[in-house]
Structure formats: C-alpha cells, structure tokens
Amino acid sequence: MRTDLSDETVGILAADESFEVRLFVCERQPNAPGVLPADVAAGRKSYSRWDMLAHRNFPADAATALARSDDPDDRVVAAAHPGLPAETIEALPADDADCIRRQAATNPSIPVDRLITLLGADESAVVSGAAANRTIPVAMMHQVLEQAGL
C-alpha cells in the first residue's frame, strides 16, 4: 500500500467498513485521521495497538483514557505516549504492574528531575525504563554506563 495517498483518499479508506482496510490506513498513512488509530486501538487488543499509539496523529485524550483505564493491557500501551498530562505521567511509574512502571519510565515527557529520581529507584524495571528514556541527559547516560561497569 502506498504511503502518500491524498487526504481525500485516506478519508474514504478510513471510513471503510472493513477493519483490515482501516488498520492498513493506520499502519501505512501518516495522514490518517487521529480518531482512526484511536478507534483501532480501542477496538482490538493485539500487537497493532502499540503501532496505533505510536502514530503521530494518535490523540492525547485517547492515550490518557487508556492510561487511566482499570485494564493493565490498556495502561501499558499508553504509558509512554508523550501527550499524557503531567499528573498521569507522574502516577504511572507507581502502578501495581511492573511492565507499566517500566514503560512509563520511558515516556519522553517525564521531567528530567523525575527521570533522574527514577534512575535511582530500587526496582530494576523502573531503572531500566528510565535508562532507556531517550531524553536522559548525556551526562546522566555516562553515569549510568559507568555504574554498570561499561
């Protein structure tokens, strides 16, 4: 499938009754309307949910709803979404599930001071997530590598 379809064509395909067509639009079209990846992510719990949350048009309010869900499968896919509100970003590293805590620590919107705190956490899942965060300051990266003996 081409990745350069016009907005009009993408709109027609996004309204198709076939889930598979809508999924392909989300996976292949950078101009897919944000509501479409949100609907796909809400409607199916499969590996493609991760791709939907990573879509540049995935709405922050839909990610926030997933991050605040009672279902840990929803929270884990939304935990690293950069559009989450600050209070949600702060709450997720304290979640009951370690996979959510780790994923939340990778969120690029975590303030640097909080990220540094997470690097010193007692729990390896949180520390590994924070160490994998792409916004970690370079000086802190060197410190983490030195502490690991690398």
Image (cartoon, helix red, strand yellow):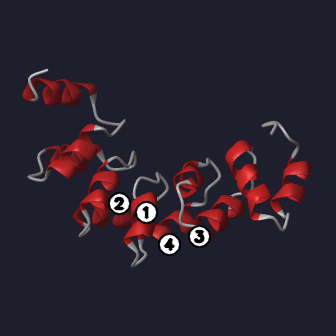
Q: Write down the residue under mark 2.
A: 89
Determine the secondary structure under disc 2: helix
Spatial CA span between label 1 and label 3:
19 Å
* Occupied quadrant, residue 88: bottom left
59 relative position to 71: left or right: right
Disc 4: CA contacts within 10 A as few (<14), some (14-19) or many (>=20): some
Disc 3: CA contacts within 10 A as few (<14), some (14-19) or many (>=20): some
User: Which label sits in the foreground, 1 or 3?
Assistant: 3
12 relative position to 132: left or right: right
* Quarter of the figure that contains the N terminus: top right
Instruction: State the mark number for residue 113.
Output: none
* Occupied quadrant, residue 28: top right
Q: Which of marks 3 and 2 is nearer the N terminus?
A: 3
Estimate the x, y position of residue 42 in percent, counting from the top left: 59, 70
Q: Can residue 49 be seen in this view?
A: yes
Q: Earlier in the sequence, mark 1 or mark 3?
A: 3
Q: Which of marks 4 and 3 is nearer the N terminus?
A: 3
User: Which label sits in the foreground, 2 or 4?
Assistant: 4
Of all residues, the one furthest to the top in this rendering is 150
* Quarter of the figure that contains the C terminus: top left
Q: Which amino acid does label 3 sit on?
A: Ala
Disc 1: CA contacts within 10 A as few (<14), some (14-19) or many (>=20): some
Q: Residue at x 86, y 41 (%)?
A: 5
Q: Write down the residue under mark 4.
A: 65
Residue situated in front as seen by the camera: 67 or 112: 67
Determine the secondary structure under disc 4: helix
Estimate the x, y position of residue 99 in percent, counting from the top left: 29, 58
Spatial CA span between label 4 and label 3:
10 Å
Q: Write down the residue under mark 3.
A: 42
Q: Do the residues labelled 2 and 1 touch (CB within 8 Å)?
A: yes
Q: Are marks 3 and 2 in contact (CB under 8 Å)?
A: no
Disc 2: CA contacts within 10 A as few (<14), some (14-19) or many (>=20): many
